[in-house]
Image (cartoon, rainbow, N blue to C red):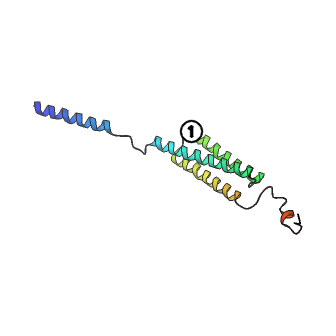
Amino acid sequence: MKKSLILLAMMALTVTGAFAQMKRSPYSSRDYERRQSYQINELKREARDRISYGVQSRALTRREANRFMGEYERIQQRERQYRSRGGLSPRESQELVNSLERLVVNVRRETHDGRRSNDHLANRRYGPRSGY
């Protein structure tokens, strides 16, 4: 009786110690939310930087920059709306990531389309009367 009681107590201590050593899963929901928030913030920063660079380098026209900033503001408004409901679900964060990636691609495409907003003198420089 005494041996079985000691054996039972030892087993209980072993099991308790094993549970105490278990780590939290690296894929917990809190970590997922943190990674998604980081990705969303990085994409927002990249979109703002690309729009700003396009305006400064005059690779974007005023109309294009306004259109892209409007799209950026709509995405930001949608993010605020989702977060006000108590956080982002995986579907909502993926929707925001997709929208931001699409915005970044569109800005990149427009800044590399070969047009310049300050190139109003191009015909004079490269046209038939370029005798400067």
Relative vertical location of residue 90 with respect to residue 8 in this rendering, above or below: below
> Which residue does the image show at 83% across and 62% down from the upper left?
122
Q: Residue furthest bottom?
A: 128
- The spot of residue 86 in percent (x, y) is 54, 38
- The spot of residue 9 in percent (x, y) is 19, 32
- Left of 62 or right of it: where is 81? left
> Which residue does the image show at 33% across and 40% down from the upper left?
22
User: The N terminus appears in which quarter of the rendering?
Assistant: top left
Q: What residue is pinned by disc 1?
A: 85
- Left of 129 or right of it: where is 46? left
> Which residue does the image show at 51% across and 45% down from the upper left?
35
- Left of 9 or right of it: where is 118? right
- The spot of residue 85 in percent (x, y) is 56, 38
Name the secondary structure under disc 1: loop
Q: Residue furthest top?
A: 2
- Left of 1 or right of it: where is 18? right
Relative vertical location of residue 39 with respect to residue 21 in this rendering, above or below: below
Query: Which one is in front, 40 or 121?
Result: 121
Query: Which one is in front, 103 or 118?
Result: 118
Task: Please tell me how crowded label 1 is: few (under 14), some (14-19), or many (20+) other residues with Cα within 10 Å.
Answer: few
Query: Which one is in front, 104 or 83?
Result: 104
User: The C terminus appears in which quarter of the rendering?
Assistant: bottom right
> Which residue does the image show at 39% across and 43% down from the upper left?
25
Relative vertical location of residue 99 with respect to residue 126 in this rendering, above or below: above
Occupied quadrant, residue 76 = top right
Q: Give the amino acid type for the residue marked by disc 1 in the picture.
A: Arg
* Number of marks drawn: 1
Query: Which one is in front, 114 or 43?
Result: 114
